[in-house]
Structure formats: structure tokens, C-alpha cells
Amino acid sequence: MDYSIAPPVTSSANPLTVEDHRRDSAGMTYVYPVVSRRAGGVSVGINLNPNNACNWHCIYCQVPNLVRGGPPPLDLPQMEDELRRLLEDIRNGAFMAERVPADLRVLADMALSGNGEPTSAPEFPRAVAIVAKVLDEYGLAGRVKLRLITNGSLLDRAAVREGIALIGKAGGEVWFKLDGGSQAAIWRINGSRQKPAAVLRRLALCAALCETWVQSCFFALDGNSPGERDIADYLDVLEAAKAEIAGVHLYGLARPSCQAEASRLGRLSSEWLEGLAMRIRACGLTVRVSP
């Protein structure tokens, strides 16, 4: 395949905003650009779940028509072609000028994420290897972060650990989901039956392979902010994991949920999130807050 003559990505669509993370914004199957408040610029997403299937059901998820399950077989050559085409438009085309706010015109990262749990794809390690290769060929290795955004539930699979090890070798990092510190909270928020002990074990496996940050979403439910019991349970898990993780990304709701529970959810104030961040920092952890 001759990538030198690949057509540029159309740049005529509406400008990107932090409130809009649609996966079809570039008209591609696997690759999509977003403006990320947490990454601090343009994040190139690689969607390994184009069928909107996930093994979890987070009540705040912005994916429409979300179903339980895993992805279809991936067309990795198509994924690589889409990635190269978008990179060409970002670096040499009109993409940044036409679609990105002036203060965010920097390529911040490439993130394996999307419309479901990316590590559920059997091709996951091969997809990671392709992204790392493209970063290297474009002279971006070590300058543009390679990230995995995951719920961490599949770390017991050897192929998942293989892919995460490749991310670590490339100097990347993992954002590992943790929204609750008890089995009841994890079920209520994420629709998963896993226990905190299993989360901690998988978190340790992940951190041994690659720099790992915990990412946590907090919100009001039925008009109520999280109670002290839920917060204490959450802090207990962080306390147990603090020697292994790089820190915590704490964030609130920026985009509306597309799940049946959407009407029950509400945003928490910046002050509330900062209050929780102070308690996390008191555990000795670095915290980044995105209200």
C-alpha cells in the first residue's frame, strides 16, 4: 500500500470541542480525532470496538446503543491506513487550522480507546504494535504519548499483558478505570461484578508492565453526591495501590450519557472534586482534576 498518495482526511466538518467525542468525526471506522481536556490537546483515538460492544455497562457512558459483548474481527491494514491518513492531515493539511481551537493545536497523544473495552479485541497486541510503529516512522515516538484507556478487567489474559508491555516499551501509559471501591459501587456504576481485591490484583499486573494512572469519574446520582462510605471505600483501594500507580485522573461529567440512567446523573461542582482531590493527595498520590 502506497501511503505517500493516501488522500487527506476531509477538514470541512464542524470544529472539535471537548463536549463532542464522536467516533465518526473523521468519517473512518477505527480512527477518530477528539479535543481532550485531560490530554491537553488533540487526541487521536483508535476505536477497537466499532460495534459499540463492551463487557461493562457504565451508567455515564457516552456511547449510543451500547451492548454487552466484544468487537468484531479487526481489519488491521485498514486501521493503519486510517491512522496514517489522519496523521498526514494533522501534520501537513488543514485539520488543525479548521477543526481545532487555537489554544489546543497540539498533537497530545494516541489513545487506544473507543466504543467498548479495547483490550477485548484478540488483535489488541498487534494493534498496539502498529500504532507504535507508525509513531516511530513519523518521528513522534517519545514526543506523542501512546495511551491505553481501559477498565482493566481483562489483565488476566496473556495477550492483554503482551499489548500493555508493548505500550510500556514505547514509553506510553495506561489509564485504568476505578470509579468505586466496593463491589456494590462497582456494580452500581460500571455494571461489573468484580471485587476490589480483583481490581487491585489486575492493577498491580498492569503497573508492573507500564506506567499506570487510575482514572475515576465522579458524579451526582439521583440528586445526591457520593456518600462518605463510598468515598472511604474508594480511598481504601487507592491507599492499597499507591505504591504501584503514577497517580489519579479525577474527572466529572463533561458530555451527556447515552444510557438509560442518563436522567439520574448530574455534574458535581469543581469545589466538590477539588475536595476529593485533596483527600487523595493526603494519601501521597498525584492528582489531576478535570471538572
Image (cartoon, rainbow, N blue to C red):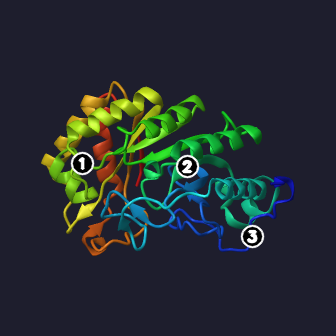
Q: In which quarter of the image is residue 46?
A: bottom right
Please report whichever mark, 2 or 3, sits nearer to the chain's N-terminal start: 3
Q: Picture coordinates of residue 101 (x, y %)?
A: 66, 61
The residues tagged by marks 2 and 1 sit, at their Cα atoms, a distance apart of 23 Å
Q: In which quarter of the image is residue 198?
A: top left
Compared to 128, does 26 lie above or below? below
Label 1 sits on a secondary structure element that is: loop
Could you tell whether 209 is left or right of 183 in the image? right
Where does label 1 land, which residue? Answer: 180
Please report whichever mark, 2 or 1, sits nearer to the chain's N-terminal start: 2
Q: Picture coordinates of residue 6 (x, y %)?
A: 81, 60
Name the residue nearer the viewer: 87 or 228. 87
Could you tell whether 283 is left or right of 253 in the image? left
Q: Picture coordinates of residue 285 (x, y %)?
A: 35, 31
Q: Which of marks 2 and 1 is in front?
A: 2
Where does label 2 land, which residue? Answer: 111
> Can the viewer see residue 286?
no
The residues tagged by marks 2 and 3 sit, at their Cα atoms, a distance apart of 21 Å
Q: Residue at x 44, y 43 (%)?
A: 175
Where does label 3 land, which residue? Answer: 10
In the displayed orientation, state which residue is furthest to the right. Answer: 5
Compared to 228, does 60 lie above or below? below
